[in-house]
Each structure stands twice: as C-alpha cells, then as structure tokens.
Image (cartoon, coloured by chain):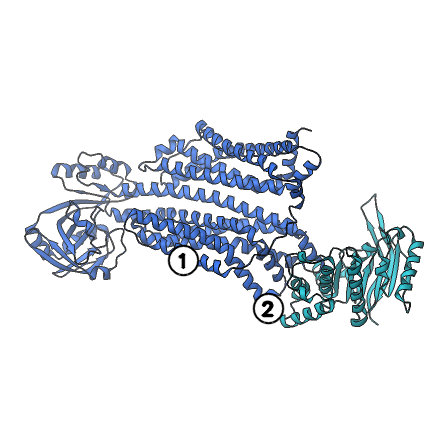
Amino acid sequence: MRTIVEARQVKKLFGSKGSVSTALQEIDLTVLEGEFVGIMGPSGSGKSTLLHLIAAIDEPTAGSIHIDGSNLHTMNEEQISKFRRDKLGFLFQDYNLLDTLTVKENILLPLALAKVPVAELELRVEEITDKFGIKPLLAKYPYQLSGGQKQRTAASRAIIARPSLILADEPTGALDSKSATDLLESLKELNEQDQATLLMVTHDAFAASYCSRVLFIKDGTIFTELVKGQTPRKAFFRKILDVLSVLGGGAGDVI
Amino acid sequence: MTLFSTAVKNMKGNFRNYLIYFVSMMFSVVIYHTFVSLQYSTDVQASIALSKNVEVTFKTASFVLILFVFIFIWYSNSFFTRKRKKEVALYSLLGVRKRSIGKMLFYENLIISTIVLAAGILIGTLLSKMFGMLLLKLLGTTAEIGFHVSGSAILNTTLVFAVIILITSIQGYRLIYRFKLIDLFQADKQAESVPKASPLLALLAAILLATGYVFISLSFDSESDLMRNYGVAFVGITLGTYLLFRCLTVFLLRLAQKNKARYYRGLNVVGTSQLLFRMRGNVGTLTIIALLSAFTLLATDIAFSQYYTNTKHAEQTSPFSYMHLSQGQAFDEQVNRIIAADSKHAVTAAIDIPVIKSSGRTSSSVVFPERYSEEEDKPVKIISTTTYGVIAKALHLERAVNPAAGEAVAVKTMYTDYSLSDYKKEKLTLELPTRSWELSFSDLLEDRILSWSFPDFVIVICDDLYGDLKDLSSEVLYKAYKVEGESSTAETATELMLLDGAEKAGLTSYYHEYKTGLEDTGIGTFVAVFLGLVFLAATGSILYFKQLTEAHSDKERYTILRKIGVTRKEIRASILKQSLFIFGLPLLLGITHSIVVVNAMSKLFSNLVDVNFTVPVLFSTALYVMIYLFYYILTVTSFNKIVND
C-alpha cells in the first residue's frame, strides 16, 4: 500500500533567541493510503502545529516530511501552492468558505484553479453534492446556510479535486451534534468507499471514534496510539476516553 | 493624557494611511494659492499685454476649485470617520463620552488640516515664481518674475480654507452622534446582497447616453436652443453614466458568469463575483469619476487645442503683418514711415490691394448667409486676378487662379468648413447700381488673402470683368505690409494702433491677433490643466481609498485562497484584473464622453471649426491616462501588500 504521509524526526521550535518553546520534538508519523487517522491531545500539545507542518502552511525546524512522495522541504513557494492545490484537501473549523461565491462556485473552486474543462467540472460537482446531500443548495450563498450545510459545502470543496490527503482541523468544532454526526458519517463513507486518506485533528472523542487509528500527542511527543481494527465504534469511543483520562489535562475539555 | 495629545498620537499612527489624502489636499491648496497669487501678482499683470480675461478666468477657476475641494474634503472626511467606527466603539466601551470622542476627531481634523494648509501655502509661495514663469512662457512673454510673498494671497487662501476646514471638522464631530454602539460592532458584518441585472434599466442607460450624444451634436439657431440642447445633453449623459454603472456593469459581469468555460477557470470565478458584490457601493464614486474625467479632458482639450492652433488662427485672421485702408497720402505715409523705421523687422513686401465692394446674393444663401446683406458695408469684396498674383507673390502662396469670364474663385470664409462642392451648388449675383452679373464658382482658395472683417466674403474674378465692374462702382485701396519676424512686432504694432485714424482705417496687425489669442488661450490652458490635475489627484485618491478599504475586508478571503493552494502570483493577477475593471471603466467612459463632446462642439462652434484637435486631444488624453495609471499602480501595489503578504 502507498505511503501518503511520511514525517521523520520532525521538530518545531517557536520564538527567537532567549525564549524558545518547543512545540514538537522529533515526531515520526506515517499515514498509509486509505487510512483515517485522528490526532488528539490537550490544548497546546502541538497537534495543530503538526497539521500545519503537513499542510505546508508552516515549516519544521528540523526533520523531513514527504507527502505522496514529494519532499516539502525542497519545494519553493510556488511549488508548495501547487502541491497544496493538487495533493491536499482542507476542512476547517470555521469552514473558510468565500462569502461572495455561491455554494456551487465554492465547491468547484479547486477544479477551476486546476483548469478542469467545464463539462467534467459540472459532472464532478453534481456527483459530490449528491453524496453530501447539498444539491438543492447549489445556488445559495454561504450566509444563507446553516453551520452543517456550510461544513458539508467545505467538505465537498476539500475532496472535489480528489486529493491524495484530506486534512481536517476540528471540522466538527462549530457544529451541533446532529450536523457533526452527519459530517462524520460522510467522511467515514468517503474513507471506506472511495479509499480517501484522511488526517483529522480533533478535541472530540466522539469525532475521533470514527477514525481507523488515533494518535495521542502530549507536550510535543506522541504519547500513544489506538487502532480501531474490528472494534465496534462505541467500544472504540470508550477506549479513547480511557486514554484521554490517562493523558490528563485533555479530559476536561473532551465532553 | 489629554484629548489633544490622544488626537496627536492617533494622527501619528494613521499618518501612512492618510498620506495620499494629505498630498491631494495639499495639492489643491497649492493650486488654489497659485491661482490667487497670480491674480494678485503685479509682475504677471504687467506682462499680460492685451488679454482682458485674466482676472475673470482666474476668479472663475478659483471658485470652481473651492467648490470641488469642499466636496472632496467633506467626502473624504466622512469616509475616514466611518472607517474608524471600530475605534470609536472602543472608546465608547471604555466609557468615553461621545462628546469627548467627537471633540477628539474634531481636533484631529483641525490639526491635520492646519498642517496641510500651512504646508500648502508654503509650497505654493515657494513655487509661485515657477508657476508664474510657466504661465508667462505659455503666453509667449519672456519677462522675468521676481520672488514675492503676497500677503493678500496668503490671507485669501487661509480664509477660504479655514472656512472649509471648520465646516468639515464640525461635520466629523456631528457624525459621531449618528453612530449607535451596536452598529459600530456590526459595521462589517452587513451581508451585501448581489445586485440584479435589469435589462430595462440597461437599455434606459443606453438610450439616455445616446440622447445626450445626439443633443450635444444638434445645430442651433439661438442661445435658448443651445441652452436647451446642452441642458438635455448634460442630464442625459449624467443619468446615463450613472445607470450605465448601475446596470450595464452588472449586466456585463453577469454575462461573464454565463461564459462557463472562462468563468470557471482559475481565479476568474472569485474576481468576477467580488466585483459583482462590490458594484452597488461603487456606482456613485465611479459615476463621479467618469464625469469629472470627461469634464477635465473636455476643458483641457478645448483650451489646449485653441492654444495649439493659435498661430494658424492668427495667420488666417491677419495674413499680412499690417494692413489698412488707404486714408489719403498723409496717413498712408505716416504708417509706411513707422513700419520702415522698425529695423529689426525688415519689410519683405509692401503692396497695394485694390478692392471693389459690391452688394450681392447667392441662389440658396448657404455659403452667403442673408445676414451679410443686412450689414451697412457692402458684403462682397472683389479682387482681380492680377491683384491676386501680387498678393500670392507677397505671401508666398503657391496656388494660381485663372477664373474665366462669368466665374468667380471664392476665398474660404473663416469659421466655416464649406467645401468647393458647397460653393458649386450656388450662383452668385453681384448687384451693382446699374447692372447685375451672375457668376458661378469655379474654385476655392483655402489660404486667406485679406484681414478678417465682417462680412467675410472675398472673391477673385478675371481682370476684364474687374475692369467692367470698376467702371460702374468705386474702388477702395488696401495697403498691406509683410515683415520678417511678425510675431514680435510689439512696439511697432502698438504705435500703429495708437495713430489717429487707425480705427477708421481698419488697421490690423498680425501681432495683435497672435498675441491676444495666445494670452486668452494660454491662460485658459494653464487654468484647465491645473484644475484638471487637482480633479485627477482628488478622484485618484478617492479610488485609492475605496480600493484599500475593500482590500482590508477582502483580506480574509485571500487568506482562505492561499490556504487552498492559490499562488501569490495568481492572487496578484486577479487583483490587477479587478482593479483594472474599477479604474478602467470610468476612464474609458470619461474619454469617450470627452471625445464625443469635443467632436460635436468642433463642428458646431464657428470659432472651433478651424481648430486642429487631433494632436492636442491625443496629447492631453495620453497625459491623463499616464497620471491615472500612476494611481492604478499605486493602488494595486498597496492592495497586493495588504492581502498578499
């Protein structure tokens, strides 16, 4: 199976001389094609930093990251943008939809950037919005949508260009429980049916229980790892809670 | 910390943001001060020899300038105050009373304006000599202007701007009371609605503009007709421009959205939508900028074209250096003596031109209007072929004429653009006391051979016919001189004009025609160019601020785009395109308006008929576009810095 993410000895320091704080210390991470990996940890543990490094939004102080075979370190600004566009899909807590574009235009943006012919583009939009159940909303503007609808729009945008890796940063953070469940179900379906590779940072044990593997980070190092295997989701959820209670600090803001 | 020191601190912090505004405002103070200084300058007044329009022109220009500056400052001020809603809200939350906040803004505006005013007057005074010299150069005078600090000019500028500053400062103070705390926090959250394209209104815009254009080109018989035409045209063009921005732009952008292959390609989808959302808020500004551009270009075009064509105009009005009707030996010799005594301007030709004056009419009175016959003087001036030969030799004209009996060669009437075919359609009847002759036109001379006087109708006929006419009618004798360097014969020309009987002799000089024209059109050009520059600076800075405000609220959108993998280069290209739309449309419309109107006016107004517009219009339009381009580049650079770093 293909390796999608390969991070070796990744280290990240913040601040300048005199007051350096370590966000990540020598982390190794491998994500294979078709995996749905969750990253959990208390606030300040470095989980968002790790996501930013993988998304090439930030650069590591030391170590190397390869995504789908390309080394992020050797790429220049332009290449990184192209890389993000071609290989990555993003899902953010605050949706990051463009309010001047309709739902349809928001979704097709990555394809437009990749200069995909109109006929194929329309087809893909059709296909994806069908999957996420937002087809009737295509002509609407983001301010006319509910939170759940917005996040499903964002999810459609994230996957429409068929990226090698979908990065989700607290995607359920701003959603009510019904919308959150709907979204997670959709992501799981995507993972299982389309073999999409997902990496999701979350606070929420319930969200993490949809993953096939969950990494726990504490103080910039990997604390432990849980693999779902054949465990039913509810049992996996309880296992995650157990780890969190050991992890400490994080448990308070789980539920 | 006092309110005053807070105000000073705020200004220091905001200085960079307001720099363009300061510069534009200071520029208008400099120009106003220059206009006033030139009005008061004794040096300038002494150097202007003939024109009587100087003071009126400068006073009108100053008035227009004040009116404009007032609106500009008022607009900018309320714009800035609104931009600082959040800051005001913060003070309110901290428990500062509105009265105090208002006072603070009042102080700020007062301090800024005072500094700008002082700096403007200082620079204006320092540059007044340069501007004065520039004006005199335009007027073709070489006199030196000394450096003067004009107390009355400074007082005038200070008073006028003090009033403007006070009124706008009070307005800033009052604006605070209209804000509600809750509005302040919601200022940026108001959802902008997408404007709809109304084909009906777009059609109306096109109709209004077409009506305006048609009415500006209609010929007129009376002043009231003219006023009506121009009134209709003004309303049509103004409303049409507004509706055009309101609808046609939306229509065009919607059309762009329909072309999916283009629209769904790269950042076009983002750029087009942004523009569409923003259109409603920009309509007013774009209309004003388009109209001001049109007005500026129009004024500059006309003034500059007349200035540019002045030499040709003077040559046509007064083809000889000096010319007068013979008044008997004593007077004629006196004139001859004065001209011969001017050693710097050697006489190259001194000729006698016998002319028969006759009554007459033409078959359909197009080239020979009926009002010619209503004049006391006999309207048709007749010259023989031989005399024409003498004139042609003196003036170095290449054209030879050879009318047969029964034919007349017409000299083109000034301020008309009739061609030979217009003349050929008519028959001229010369009515002498005892007999009349019917002549047909065989040729048309473009070059003028006699000084202009009303009625201006000159023909050349064959010597035989001239002889026949001479027996039946009396002849008058013109004395004409051609000298070297005729545009600098100030002393001689003036001395001749002051002679007893000069007026009765209809004495004309090339110098007077040339100089009067040069001064009138030179001052016009000077004023039009500088007023235009102020308009341009002000409107440019308004566009700049509008765009930058949008940049600040767009910042988040561009961050999102960066995150999903849009390169900086692509964002830059999209900004260039969007700003081009905003900057380009009013410019394009302004240029179109000005060219249409100039074109129409050049056909309608007799004093513009002979004016060469091509070169001056190209020149002033190119200059305008260049300065405008500067604002565009400045805006795009700042915009890019805000959203793309």
Residue bearing mark 2: B261
Q: Residue furthest top?
A: B151
Q: Which residue is mark 1?
A: B210
Image side of residue B589 versus residue B181, left or right = left
Left or right? Give the position of A235 relative to A98.
right
Tell us which disc is closer to us: 2 or 1: 1
Q: Position of residue B299 (x, y in %)?
A: 40, 47
Q: Residue at x 46, y 39 (%)?
A: B67
As measured in the structure, the alpha-carbon distance from the residue carrying label 2 to the one carrying label 1 is 33 Å
Name the element at disc 1.
helix
Q: Nearer the viewer, residue B258 or B19?
A: B258
Q: Is residue B512 above or below residue B594?
A: above
Residue B477 in sight in this render: yes
Say which chain is blue. Answer: B
Residue B641 in sight from this viewpoint: no
The spot of residue A191 in percent (x, y) is 80, 68
Q: Position of residue B88 (x, y in %)?
A: 65, 38
B383 left or right of A45?
left
Residues at circles 2 and 1 in contact by the CB criterion of under 8 Å: no
Q: Is residue B492 left or right of residue A139?
A: left
Instruction: Count neighbours of disc 2 (C-alpha within 10 A) and say few if under 14, some if 14 to 19, many if 20 or more.
Output: some
Say which amino acid is labelled 1.
Answer: Ala
Are there few (<14), some (14-19), or many (20+) residues within 10 Å of tag 1?
some
Quarter the C terminus of chain A occupies: bottom right
- Looking at the rendered structure, whether the residues under marks 2 and 1 are on a common chain is answered as yes
Q: Report the disc number at residue B490.
A: none
Colour of chain A in the image: cyan
Quadrant, the N terminus of chain A = bottom right
Q: Residue at x 19, y 38 (%)?
A: B503
The amino acid beneath tag 2 is: Ala
